[in-house]
Image (spheres, helix red, strand yellow):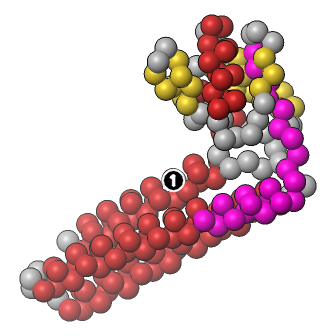
Amino acid sequence: MIKDAIRETETKMKNSIQSLEDDFTRIRTGRATPALIEKLAVEYYGVPTPLQQLASISVPEARQLMIKPFDASSVKDIEKAFLTSDLGLTPNNDGKVIRLNLPPLTEDRRKDLVKLVNTRLEEGRISVRNFRRDTIKDIREFEQEKMISEDDLERGEKEIQDLTNSFIEQMENIATEKEKDIMEV
């Protein structure tokens, strides 16, 4: 019973780490990467569609992204999506492809991005701690209902705490790597 609860909690914590990594791929560093824009919602025939479903995204140069739409008629829609987004990128449209030149990050912008990374890290920590809290509450209920012994409860709580510490440490390592990428000139 405790093992099932711990396994379920571990799965939820792994999902939190995956979510954090996905968030971090959308935070810009000094280099161009398709992950920055692939989830951008483009209004395509009245339906918001992720850019990755409408076009191929490549990186011809370190600070440039090239978007080649599968349907040439969607170029204007994609361009409009960039102009209305909060990415701060101006698309260059030649009729067939869209090029995005990523300007170098200023020191202030880098610091803002590091703050954003730390905010997302804290959100991730909170979600992991919430999973810990819920699981401990569940196994305490098992103990109150005499389904497990007090010793099993203590072992379970220790195991959950160790698991929580491990996942929080992984999140902090991921955030530290992202901060290094952002601050790299």
Residue 14 x/y as whole percent: 46, 59
Say which quarter of the image contains residue 83.
Answer: top right
At horizontal 88% and vertical 46% (from top left) the residue drawn is: 104
> Is 162 located above or below residue 185 in the figure?
below
At horizontal 46% and vertical 21% (from top left) the residue drawn is: 47
From the image, tell me which residue sits under label 1: 19
Q: Residues within 10 Å of mark 1 (few under 14, many from 20)?
A: few
What is the quadrant of the N terminus in the image?
A: bottom left
> Is 12 located above or below residue 100 in the figure?
below
State left or right for residue 64 relative to residue 132.
right
Residue 184 x/y as whole percent: 86, 57
State left or right for residue 126 relative to residue 172.
left
What is the quadrant of the C terminus in the image?
A: bottom right
Residue 106 lies within the magenta run = yes
Residue 26 lies within the magenta run = no
Residue 42 x/y as whole percent: 57, 25
Say which quarter of the image contains residue 168.
Answer: bottom right
